[in-house]
């Protein structure tokens, strides 16, 4: 069957393709987990592009409530309007504010819905969306109407694993864990993003990158997105490949390390390692 | 159709349910896997496993169910103890893994059938597991039979991945081994466990509409609107950490550090103090200045009310005198025994627990661990995700 495949810009492994296609075929949500920076959010964009559906993005924050994705009843405006004698106050429907899921359900063509970082929200958030994601419909109490999806949207949910998700929720999803790419895959990813990159620079940069990832005790290992940022910086600075070569990551802090190392403890760790190695060597 | 597989998964501790099984069958019918074994593996993994910690178990069960291999044994190189050997499988394995030259060498030993025959005989003679050596079937030897060996005409038995070339099957690679339960305690796991301790309360800036308050105020205002707001609910649990430093705790610095950094990002009200082996009359906040900047424990008790939850982190490994008798401390002269100070602390903070980085199985080997456990009324938990879970459950009562 046709469906989602690796594109020029997004390199998907075969298992990811199967997971996406299964979720699309069975119209179940797909839950995607993985290290930060391995392309979970981008996946939704690529799926939308591959299927030719518009993308509805719902970014979840710690204060987001499940209800906000469906609709909100703006009681304060209605109260204020009633004081001012506004005629539209008689119809409660004027004060129902639609949420992202409502928009996706009512659309005339299938949509891809991204629920980004679901683990950021309160622990009850996934539970509150169980029925809505299962049946793809919900009930608006204020106007006594049921909103059902005209076309079941493809739902992609990402999680950074900061919270356990409830079992009942997991049971309704397909699950995929994006593993950190190995070196050949990483080369394809780099090629997809920076087609013009000098081959030797890419090779040296990847070597340094994987060495950095291998340093024990790093608090935040750099991931794909950090690598891509770093490469961009290297290209802007026009650093020659020689600047990276022969630089064992254990000996020297890589140039422009700010893109790779994201907290001062890690930078300190590198400085200490470099110091020890120079003294030892 | 694959019910056996689902049962095997459940036996191995992967919580697959009927819903997920039906989903898998539905996807099969929808033609997602399309007759390719590898796709079927990916599909079933995506449908039946919902947590990356279970991926490794899934791989093992998958290999076992769809190959008729022996059950994986405990330990690192699981599955090296042969039980039943389907000849069909052995033959296939051998054919797959031998190069033409090697097969010629097998012929030198009397051909494949003879090899199999010898193998069966030796299997019958041999009782139990065997490693090394040059005759018996086991691991890492030079006998033709067994795993991880170097005899070119060897037959591989129960070796998960080939050491010399790419494994034939994806699930045999077991790439998710790292993600299995309790392997490593990252800060994320700790945060997750600590988050159970959350207690919600309304505090801080008023950002939410207070319906009952607004109605009351509006009515009192003779009908003209008077909006009232309330603060949003958020985590208001208060935690006090006591960390053991130095001495035998040096081995556990990493785990304590992780716990500490996780706790710092999870709790708004967190205070921490250091002690050595057992808390006495003084504790300190900066380990570098422990000689000159100590704080009387009495003052800590006065500062933090009983609504704090006290968590002690330490291996509780010390001389029994350090707990039981005056002057037992290794660092200074203490007028009162450690036990008296522990009792004082625990009397003030009723909700308290002791986290021990030493595995639970080893607690029995040290007398002082038992003594501290007794003082803590058994509220001692190992410093693992599971132990933290138990602790938070106890502390949030």
Image (spheres, coloured by chain):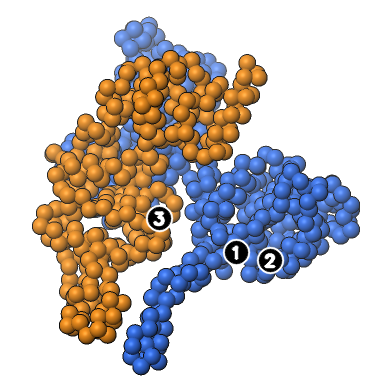
Asked if one can make out residue B85 in the rendered structure from this viewpoint, the answer is no
Is there CB contact under 8 Å for labels 1 and 2? Answer: yes
Q: Colour of chain A?
A: orange
Pinpoint residue A194: horizontal percent, then vertical percent: 29, 27
The quadrant holding residue A168 is bottom left
- Using the image, determine if residue A121 lies above or below residue B128: below
Pinpoint residue A193: horizontal percent, then vertical percent: 28, 30
The secondary element bearing badge 3 is classed as: helix
Q: Residue at x 59, y 61 (%)?
A: B269
The secondary element bearing badge 2 is classed as: loop
Q: How many marks?
A: 3
Labels 3 and 2 positioned on one and the same chain: no
Asked if one can make out residue B133 in the rendered structure from this viewpoint, the answer is yes
Residue annotated with mark 2: B304
- The residue lying furthest to the left in this view is A108
Q: Residue at x 73, y 62 (%)?
A: B300
The quadrant holding residue A100 is bottom left
Host chain of mark 3: A
**Chain drawn blue, letter?**
B
Q: Could you tell me how far apart the alpha carbons at marks 1 and 3 are, in whole angstroms?
A: 21 Å
Q: Could you tell me how far apart the alpha carbons at marks 3 and 2 are, in whole angstroms?
A: 30 Å
Q: Residue at x 84, y 46 (%)?
A: B330
Is there CB contact under 8 Å for labels 1 and 3? Answer: no
The quadrant holding residue B94 is top left
Residue annotated with mark 1: B238
* A213 to the left or right of B293: left
Quarter of the picture holding the C terminus of chain A: top right
Q: Earlier in the sequence, mark 1 or mark 2?
A: 1
Residue annotated with mark 3: A120
Host chain of mark 1: B
Pinpoint residue B388: horizontal percent, then vertical percent: 56, 54
């Amino acid at each position: 069957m046709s469906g989602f495949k690796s594109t020029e810009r997004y390199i998907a492994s075969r298992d990811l393709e199967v997971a996406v296609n299964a979720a699309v075929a069975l119209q179940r949500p797909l839950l995607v987990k993985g290290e930060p920076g391995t392309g979970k959010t981008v996946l939704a964009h690529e799926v939308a592009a591959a299927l030719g559906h518009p993308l509805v993005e719902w970014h979840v924050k710690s204060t987001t409530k499940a209800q906000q994705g469906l609709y909100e009843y703006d009681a304060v405006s209605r109260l204020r309007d009633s004081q001012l004698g506004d005629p539209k106050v008689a119809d409660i429907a004027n004060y129902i504010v639609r949420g992202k899921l409502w928009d996706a359900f009512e659309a005339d063509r299938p949509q891809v819905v991204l629920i980004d970082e679901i683990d950021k929200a309160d622990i009850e958030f996934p539970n509150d969306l169980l029925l809505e994601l299962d049946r793809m419909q919900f009930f608006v109490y204020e106007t006594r109407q049921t909103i059902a999806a005209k076309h079941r949207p493809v739902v992609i949910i990402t999680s950074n694993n900061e919270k356990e998700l409830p079992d009942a929720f997991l049971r309704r999803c397909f699950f995929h864990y994006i593993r950190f790419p190995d070196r050949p895959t990483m080369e394809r990813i780099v090629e997809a993003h920076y087609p013009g990159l000098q081959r030797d620079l890419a090779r040296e940069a990847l070597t340094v990158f994987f060495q950095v990832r291998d340093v024990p005790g790093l608090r935040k290992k750099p991931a794909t997105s950090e690598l891509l940022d770093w490469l961009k910086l290297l290209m802007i600075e026009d650093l020659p490949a020689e600047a990276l070569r022969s630089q064992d990551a254990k000996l020297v802090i890589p140039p422009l390390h700010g893109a790779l190392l994201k907290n001062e403890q890690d930078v300190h760790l590198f400085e200490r390692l470099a110091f020890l190695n120079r003294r030892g060597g | 159709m694959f019910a056996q597989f689902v049962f095997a998964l459940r036996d191995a501790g992967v919580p697959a349910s009927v819903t997920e099984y039906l989903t898998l069958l539905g996807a099969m019918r929808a033609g997602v896997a399309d007759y390719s074994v590898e796709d079927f593996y990916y599909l079933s993994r995506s449908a039946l496993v919902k947590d990356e910690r279970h991926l490794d178990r899934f791989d093992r069960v998958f290999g076992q169910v769809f190959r008729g291999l022996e059950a994986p044994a405990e330990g690192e190189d699981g599955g090296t103890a042969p039980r039943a050997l389907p000849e069909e499988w052995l033959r296939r394995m051998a054919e797959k893994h031998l190069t033409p030259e090697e097969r010629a060498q097998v012929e030198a030993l009397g051909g494949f059938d003879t090899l199999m025959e010898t193998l069966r005989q030796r299997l019958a003679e041999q009782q139990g597991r065997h490693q090394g050596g040059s005759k018996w079937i086991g691991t890492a030897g030079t006998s033709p039979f067994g795993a991880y060996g170097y005899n070119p005409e060897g037959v591989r038995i129960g070796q998960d991945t080939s050491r010399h070339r790419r494994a034939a099957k994806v699930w045999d690679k077991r790439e998710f081994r790292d993600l299995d339960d309790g392997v490593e305690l990252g800060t994320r796991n700790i945060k997750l466990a600590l988050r159970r301790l959350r207690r919600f309360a309304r505090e801080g800036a008023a950002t939410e509409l207070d319906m009952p308050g607004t109605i009351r105020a509006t009515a009192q205002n003779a009908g003209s609107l008077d909006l009232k707001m309330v603060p949003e609910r958020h985590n208001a649990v208060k935690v006090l950490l006591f960390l053991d430093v130095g001495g035998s705790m040096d081995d556990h610095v990493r785990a304590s550090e992780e716990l500490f950094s996780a706790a710092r990002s999870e709790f708004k009200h967190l205070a921490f103090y250091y002690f050595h082996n057992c808390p006495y009359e003084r504790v300190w906040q900066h380990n570098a200045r422990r000689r000159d900047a100590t704080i009387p424990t009495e003052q800590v008790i006065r500062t933090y009310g009983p609504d704090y939850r006290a968590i002690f982190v330490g291996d509780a490994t010390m001389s029994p005198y350090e707990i039981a008798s005056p002057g037992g401390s290794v660092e200074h002269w203490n007028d009162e025994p450690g036990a008296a100070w522990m009792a004082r602390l625990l009397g003030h903070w009723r909700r308290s627990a002791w986290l021990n980085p030493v595995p639970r199985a080893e607690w029995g080997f040290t007398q002082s661990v038992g003594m501290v456990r007794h003082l803590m009324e058994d509220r001692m938990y190992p410093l693992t995700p599971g132990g933290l879970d138990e602790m938070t459950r106890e502390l949030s009562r």
